[in-house]
Amino acid sequence: MYQRSVSAGVALAAGDVNADGAIDGFDSQLIADGIGTGEGDPGYFRRADLDGNNPEDLVTAGVPKVRDIALDPVGCKMYWTDGGTGKIQRANLDGSNIEDLVIYLDYPVGIALDVAGGKMYWTDWATRKIQRANLDGSNIEDLVTSADGLVSPNGIALDLSAGKMYWPDRDTDRIQRANLDGSDIENLVSVSNHTSGIAIDSQGGKMYWTDSNQSLSNGFVRRANLDGSGVETLVENLRHPVGITLDTQDGHVYWTDLVTDKIQRANLDGTNVVDILTGIDEAGGLAIDVLGGKLYWPELTTKTIQRANLDGSGLEDLVTTGID
């Protein structure tokens, strides 16, 4: 066990971490894409089958402003940012064994994992930074800062095959990317609306994102080529879509909507929109475990993490105490 003070955050580790336990050639971004919420309400986590059945409470207490969630299915871990406590935490996929990885952050928002590289990446609204650390929270690095023109970084997603990270900046109305070390920053897309979540299909050469207007009367799911060209509106007439994640194997895009309290799904081209879950009390970020057939998300009102079986049965509150 060790504790180390840094300029923004304290890293904590308790026990060994499998930082290189990913399968060779396994792209964690096809399993868990980085996404940010863009809202400041309290939060909690849930999970359900990909068809929306079997929602489960996974963490139900002490998560006042959970923003985003990312998964390591190989290591059986989920990671999340908590803007209320200024922490990055992780737990087993069943909600057990909660750990504080980084504390004393200001307002962490989006999070994404490079499991094979042993790194986690996150955005921070308050410090105007994109940072990364080892998966145990050690060795925190500043990658992109306000000195680089960063204002309000929201979600974050990785294209590990190309060595790139992508993020929307809410207040500069653009989507940007850089190398994983923060170098070579590029402006890719200018947007006119509030952009929240982002997901990458590296094999398909596309990035997907959610955005909505200031009045939250119209929201969209959009995509473009990875260089920012070829912008397409896939789904419109939403309210406030936030989290977004991809199942490229089955050709689906999933998103959350904070106003309609839904998780919805469409084909990757935006056709065949269906409601997966309704009445979910403001779901924020969204992550997918394709191997396990589950969706995970933080709920911003009831402050829990839940899960359910594939047939819709077995609603469980897995963790109800022990989170600061």
Image: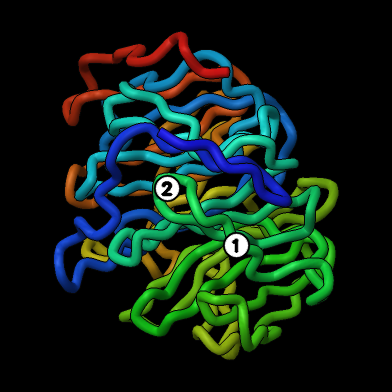
Quarter residue 198 falls in: bottom right
Is label 1 in a helix, a strand or a loop? strand
Q: Kindly tell me whether residue 297 is visible in this rendering.
A: no
Is label 2 in a helix, a strand or a loop? strand
Q: Position of residue 301 (x, y in %)?
A: 62, 21
For the image, the number of numbered tags is 2
Residue marked by disc 1: 141
Q: Kindly tell me whether residue 49 is visible in this rendering.
A: yes
Q: Is residue 67 left or right of residue 77?
A: right
Q: Position of residue 162 (x, y in %)?
A: 40, 84
Q: Quadrant of the N terminus?
A: top left
User: In the image, what residue occupies the spot 39% across and 19% down?
Assistant: 57
Task: Rate crowding at label 2 as few (under 14), some (14 to 19) or many (20 or more) other CA atoms within 10 Å.
Answer: many
Q: Nearer the viewer, mark 2 or mark 1?
A: 1
Task: Rate crowding at label 1 as few (under 14), some (14 to 19) or many (20 or more) other CA atoms within 10 Å.
Answer: some
Q: Is residue 189 left or right of residue 263?
A: right
Quarter residue 247 falls in: bottom left
Q: Which mark is residue 70?
A: 2
User: In the image, what residue occupies the spot 31% across and 39% down?
Assistant: 77
Q: Quick check: 244 above or below 167?
A: above
Q: Is residue 51 left or right of residue 193?
A: left
Q: Position of residue 35 (x, y in %)?
A: 54, 53
User: In the image, what residue occupies the spot 61% across and 35% down?
Assistant: 103
Residue sitting nearer the eye, 303 or 261: 303
Q: Which amino acid type corresponds to the residue marked 2 in the rendered image?
A: Ala
